[in-house]
């Protein structure tokens, strides 16, 4: 009779431990997904019809859950001026997600973070075309900053890669 009581307590503890691990595992998965998955959002991308790295960046956005509408434009400078992209922050493509502008090869997870956090900025930019940024993959990987910018052109580093 002593063995069955001990065995019963052991089974109860085993079931409790398994239940706790299952719950903790589920919570961990949900937290990981919230932190690391892009927010499903509509994003409009304006780009040159002949730009290959722009097409790769669009594919990167789609792979990360964004619904992308692409607008090919022959004169991207007009688009940038009309949208208010500061000249010093320009890159090869410009995008709009909600009320925010995205200039250049900004990673999808950084855009998703911006959407979640809703900072008081005009947009994000990765000026130029740094190697290793989304759409600019290759054997060389440059370090670069994702800049948050205001309507007056003031910037601050939003994230470093």
Image (cartoon, rainbow, N blue to C red):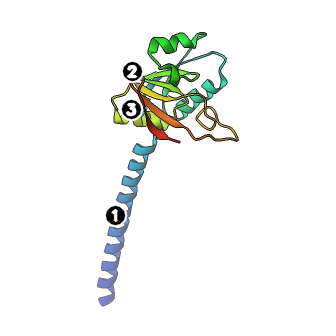
Q: Earlier in the sequence, mark 3 or mark 2?
A: 3
Q: Earlier in the sequence, mark 1 or mark 2?
A: 1
Q: Between tags 3 and 2, which lies in front?
A: 2
Residue at screen point 59% across, 36% down: 133
Would residue 103 be visible to someone looking at this image?
A: yes
Q: CA distance from mark 1 to mark 3?
A: 33 Å
Give the answer, above or below, for where 74 lies relative to 57: above
Q: CA distance from mark 3 to mark 2?
A: 21 Å
Q: Residue 28: which quarter of the image?
A: bottom left
Q: Residue 135: which quarter of the image?
A: top right
- Say which residue label 2 marks: 152
Locate residue 62, reporting x and y percent.
53, 30
- Say which residue label 3 marks: 115
Give the answer, above or below, for where 13 lies relative to 94: below
Q: Between tags 1 and 3, which lies in front?
A: 3
Locate residue 94, reporting x and y percent.
52, 21
Q: Residue 154: which quarter of the image?
A: top left
Would residue 1 be visible to someone looking at this image?
A: no
Residue at screen point 49% across, 35% down: 146
The image's mark for residue 20 is 1
Label 1: element kind: helix
């Amino acid at each position: 009779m002593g063995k069955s009581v001990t065995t019963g307590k052991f089974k109860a503890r085993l079931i409790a431990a398994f239940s706790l691990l299952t719950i903790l595992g589920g919570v961990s998965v949900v937290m990981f997904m919230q932190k690391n998955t892009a927010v499903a959002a509509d994003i409009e991308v304006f780009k040159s019809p002949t730009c290959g790295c722009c097409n790769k960046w669009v594919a990167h956005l789609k792979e990360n859950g964004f619904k992308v509408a692409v607008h090919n434009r022959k004169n991207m400078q007009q688009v940038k001026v009309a949208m208010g992209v500061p000249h010093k922050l320009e890159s090869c493509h410009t995008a709009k997600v909600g009320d925010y502008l995205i200039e250049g090869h900004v990673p999808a997870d950084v855009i998703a973070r911006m959407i979640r956090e809703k900072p008081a900025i005009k947009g994000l930019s990765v000026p130029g075309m740094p190697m290793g940024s989304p759409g600019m993959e290759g054997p060389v990987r440059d370090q670069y900053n994702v800049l948050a910018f205001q309507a007056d052109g003031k910037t601050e580093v939003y994230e470093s890669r």
